[in-house]
Amino acid sequence: MRFLALLRKELRESLPWLLLAGLLLLGVGLLTVHYEARFAHMRHQHWSSHSGLGPGEVVNTYDLVHSPHLAWVAMWLAFIAPGLGLVLGICHFWVPLFARTWSFLLHRSTSRMSILAAKLAAAILGFLISPGLVWTGLYWYACRSGLLIPEPIQILVAGWIYIVIGLVVYLGTALSALSTARWYTTRIFGLAFAALAAFLILVQWHLGWVFALAVLAIAILFGQTVAAFLSREF
Amino acid sequence: MAEIVLETKGLTKYYGAKPALDHLDLRVPRGCICGFLGRNGAGKTTAIKLMLGLLAPTAGSASLLGCDSTALTPAIRQRIGYVTEGHRLFRWMTIGRLEEFQKAFFPGQWDSRLFADMIEYFELSKKQKIKHLSNGQRAQVSLALALAPNPELLVMDDPTLGLDAAIRRQFLEGMIELITRQGRTVLFSSHILADVERVADRIVVIDKGVLRADCSLEQFRTSVRKVVVYFENSAPADIELAGLLHFRRSERQLELTLVGVGDAEVADWARQAGAGRFDFVEMNLEDQFIEFTAPAHRRRLFQWEKA
């Protein structure tokens, strides 16, 4: 009951940003898929007419291998997800500082950990639904709608890696917001660590390393954020 | 002896090398309405935040309802109502939504009827958004949110701050009605003595983080007094009188602000100083408070005048 009230509040405060990110991704995704589908169709028609084959009789191997449509959407996601992480981090941890609502929020008949857990749960849920669900839906749509040839599963995974990076940025922003040190000392740690982790995750080619680095970064930032939140003065 | 609901022992808070609160010792018994007074920046908010565990003490301790403030459990918090300074609420929420949010933390304790009555009394609507409310209206919503769960202890941090006189009066009248009819313990901070005077049966005065007075309103009223002493020749430059807070000196006249000094002691001192006569000046509570917490630079100014 108490946790749900907190979760509802955090989700409601995050909603505009989640909607914005989801709609942006959906818009870019649908436009790209349909635009690319038209091009693929035109190329197919052109190729077919010159080869003497009817429509649907030939699989266009060029499109199958090189079609960049979802990869292009994933590029957008590489900016949308960390951007969303930054904005949600600000929304959950900076705004109450500026609006001075921490005192009201913290004097609840619940533990501090529950208050933090509600914020983190709202962020994870938010990332899962938008852009996570939107991205997976776009992949499914691109594969199943008949508009385009199947996409390699790696594209889907790449998109999810960007979403995990978004979560890393969220935790980094939270940690910087909760720090009471000066920016030029340890306060920058959260954001700098998140940026470094994101970079290291992005430059990996092996999925196992990506997974290991992501888990490590999230674990470190999560631990630091919890410690900072539980001990911070408000 | 009444149960002690709120207690601080040597409660101290430093920000760097600067003390915001210095060894505050306080005991508030059950049923007491305690006015917590101090000028802006005196350390009232720091003290309240320390009591509620929002700040960690540098030294000393505080306990509320028998629980140490650094480890207040959810069950204890459920028994404490808190009106934050500036009435900072979630701006995007409507009053109704804020009620739903608050209610979730007081299962089986929330008095929906009382909340509705208060909202009606203050001429508000549950559909109104917090961001569209004035300061005074937000104060009223804060009060309703803090009182609806019927807390045993109500802590209010300068609830009338920033309100104009009319709104302040309406707010206080609502508060008095609700507080007195339920007999709860209240700690009510303010820098406006007239507000506290209407509500409190005991006052605690802090100045620059130091406890200056902890007594009944009546004791304070009788303790802080001003006397004008007239001299036939020039007034003395040096004044040795226990209980002297500060003084103003003119050619043949001294205006002394005293605390805890009886008529006989004043008469003795006046005779020894060669004064012709002296008169006690009527002061209202506001004047007494202002004189009592007069900043140190005023004393320096008078010393300079003296020289």
Image: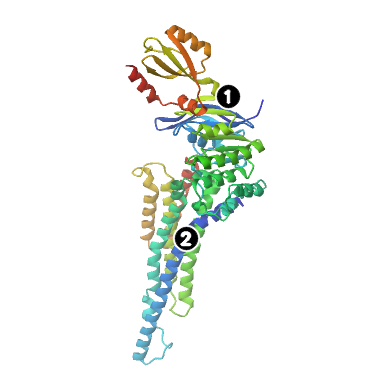
Identified at 54% across, 34% down, the residue is B195
Farthest residue toward the left? B307
Identified at 38% across, 76% down, the residue is A65
Residue A177 position, x and y percent, is: 42, 47
**Residue A119: which disc?**
none
* Residue type marked 1: Glu
User: Helix, strand or loop at disc 1?
Assistant: helix
Share a chain, discs 1 and 2?
no
Farthest residue toward the bottom? A52
Residue A182 position, x and y percent, is: 36, 42
Chain to which mark 1 belongs: B
A144 is higher (above) or lower (below) than A51: above
For marks 1 and 2, give the one nearer the viewer. 1
Residue bearing the label numbered 2: A16
Label 2 Cα crowd, 10 Å radius (few <14 / some 14-19 / many 20+): few
User: Helix, strand or loop at disc 2?
Assistant: helix
The image quadrant where one finds the C terminus of chain B is top left
Foreground of the two, A90 or B150 = B150
**Left of A31 or right of it: where is A226?**
right
Foreground of the two, A93 or A185 = A93
Identified at 49% across, 52% down, the residue is B131
* Residue type marked 2: Pro
Q: CA distance from mark 1 to mark 2?
A: 55 Å
**Residue B218: which disc?**
1
Chain to which mark 2 belongs: A
The image quadrant where one finds the N terminus of chain B is top right
Residue B47 position, x and y percent, is: 50, 33
Foreground of the two, A59 or B187 = B187
Could you tell me if residue B210 is visible in this image?
A: no
A32 is higher (above) or lower (below) than A193: below
Residue A60 position, x and y percent, is: 39, 83
Foreground of the two, B38 or B197 = B197
